[in-house]
Amino acid sequence: MDFQDFKESIKNRKYFNEKEEYLIHKARCRHNSALIRVSNSLGLKHIITGHSPRHTISNHLSQSDFTDDEIRQVLGHTDIKTTKIYLRERIGVSPTMKIMKRINDENSKN
């Protein structure tokens, strides 16, 4: 699967057909499976998923005094309600932030 598989749909700005939706689903599953294997091999308590970077960036931006609407734009959401789901989880330090801090600390030692 590559960009060419979706070129026509993207060019015409139409919805993906059933085959394209299936290919996207399969790619997402493979991606998340790989991230789970990485998480397990690193011995992480919390599993990393494809959404981990999105949660991380929303957390960084919210702690850096960006507005909810600016964060919405960065995440590419059309509805602020979707962004608020990410921001609602920002009470205290998120598991993703703990993981990123641990990885950063370990890399700093090397």
Image (cartoon, grey):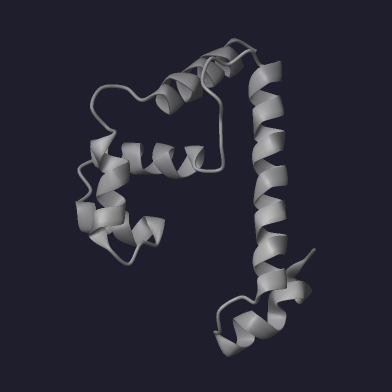
Please name the residue shown 24% across and 38% down the image.
88
Where residue 13 appears, as percent x and y from the top left, is 55, 85
Q: Quadrant of residue 76?
A: bottom left
- Report the side of 61 relative to 57 (left or right): left
Q: Position of residue 4 (x, y in %)?
A: 77, 75
**Nearer to us in this view, 65 or 91:** 91
Number of numbered labels in the structure image? 0
Residue 61 visible, this angle = no
Q: Is residue 39 above or below residue 33?
A: above
- Asked where in the image residue 16 lies, by quadrant, the reply is bottom right
Left or right, residue 69 beside residue 38: left
* The quadrant where residue 109 appears: top right
Q: Observer-nearest residue: 23 or 91?
A: 23
Residue 30, placed above or below residue 95: below
**Residue furthest front as drawn:** 18
Quick one: quadrant of the C terminus? top right
The image shows residue 8 at horizontal and vertical percentages of 69, 85
**Identity of the residue drawn at 44% across and 45% down:** 54
* Res. 101 visible in picture: yes
Spot occupied by residue 30 in the image (x, y as percentages of width and height): 72, 44
Q: Where does the N terminus fall, quadrant-wise?
A: bottom right
In the image as oriented, which residue stretches furthest toward the bottom? 12
Q: Residue at x 43, y 19 (%)?
A: 98
Q: Is residue 70 left or right of residue 58?
A: left
Q: Residue at x 49, y 25 (%)?
A: 100
